Image: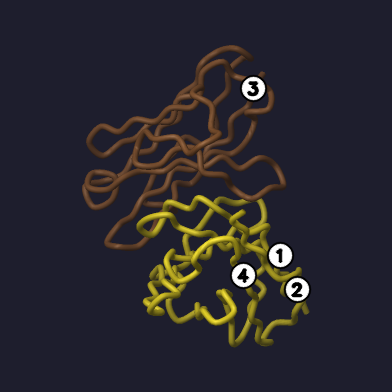
Chain colours: A brown, B yellow
Amino acid sequence: QSVLTQPPSVSAAPGQKVTISCSGSSSNIGNNYVSWYQQLPGTAPKLLIYDNNKRPSGIPDRFSGSKSGTSATLGITGLQTGDEADYYCGTWDSSLGVFGGGTKLTVL
Amino acid sequence: EVQLVQSGAEVKKPGESLKISCKGSGYSFTSYWIGWVRQMPGKGLEWMGIIYPGDSDTRYSPSFQGQVTISADKSISTAYLQWSSLKASDTAMYYCARSVRGVIIFDYWGQGTLVTVSS
């Protein structure tokens, strides 16, 4: 069981917006930056968001991140069928890394 | 171009030892942390540990401390993950990844190494 809590699944229709939450504590999210990863079926994870809300080069601005207190949120607008994937939050806790349990996004 | 290339899939028996590798190229291997991430079949990502090849500083998740050993050979830009005695529960995909800063901002990932442990 992960120290970071994510909903197991979320769903939305193409073109809509979805948010994925990641809840932690003061020892992890509350005092550290959060990253988000996308894992398409059968592939390695890909960095989507780092430092709470920054996008690496090549990541479209449909993806956004935010953090408030001990929770973080990934937002995806203009949903596409290609966004169907598992999404993971990550941060550090006592100088070690931790991931959330993951959220499966279904684009209906 | 930054690349992390992992060694191929392995099939082992319980009790056997194993060392898998992750070769970095296209960047200064000694200047970035390399982490290892486990993904058991149908499950989520688990942060196992990380090494800084520049000085071999290594950190382990409590869940993996004593169960695996992470090392690196900076002369050949390669990081390793090894087991001395595999268990069936070690069956998983293992990814290496480069951290651009800190211990979990993984900007480049290897393709994964599937380890199957079965009698």
Mark 1 near mark 3, Cβ–Cβ under 8 Å? no
The residue drawn where x is 56% and y is 50% is B44
Query: Dot 2 corresponds to which residue?
Result: B10
Q: Are marks 1 and 3 on the same chain?
A: no
Residue flagged by tag 2: what amino acid is it?
Answer: Glu
B68 vs A82, nearest the viewer? A82
B73 vs A72, nearest the viewer? B73
Which circle, 2 or 4, is nearer the viewer? Answer: 4
The circle drawn on residue B22 is 4
Q: CA distance from mark 3 to mark 2?
A: 35 Å
Mark 4 near mark 3, Cβ–Cβ under 8 Å? no
The circle drawn on residue B114 is 1
Q: Give how far across and how far down residue B66 sits, in percent.
A: 45, 81
Whichever of callouts 1 and 2 sits on the residue coming sooner in the sequence is 2
Query: Disc 3 sits on a residue from what chain?
Result: A
Query: Disc 4 sits on a residue from what chain?
Result: B
Q: Give how far across and how far down residue B35 sits, in percent.
A: 49, 64
Q: CA distance from mark 2 to mark 4?
A: 14 Å
Q: Are marks 4 and 3 on the same chain?
A: no
The residue drawn where x is 38% and y is 79% is B55
Q: CA distance from mark 1 to mark 2?
A: 6 Å
Q: CA distance from mark 1 to mark 3?
A: 29 Å
How many numbered markers are drawn?
Answer: 4
Which circle, 4 or 1, is nearer the viewer? Answer: 4
Asked whether, in this view, residue A42 is left or right of residue A3, the answer is right
Mark 1 near mark 2, Cβ–Cβ under 8 Å? yes
Residue flagged by tag 3: what amino acid is it?
Answer: Val
The circle drawn on residue A107 is 3
The residue drawn where x is 39% and y is 58% is A97
Residue flagged by tag 1: what amino acid is it?
Answer: Leu
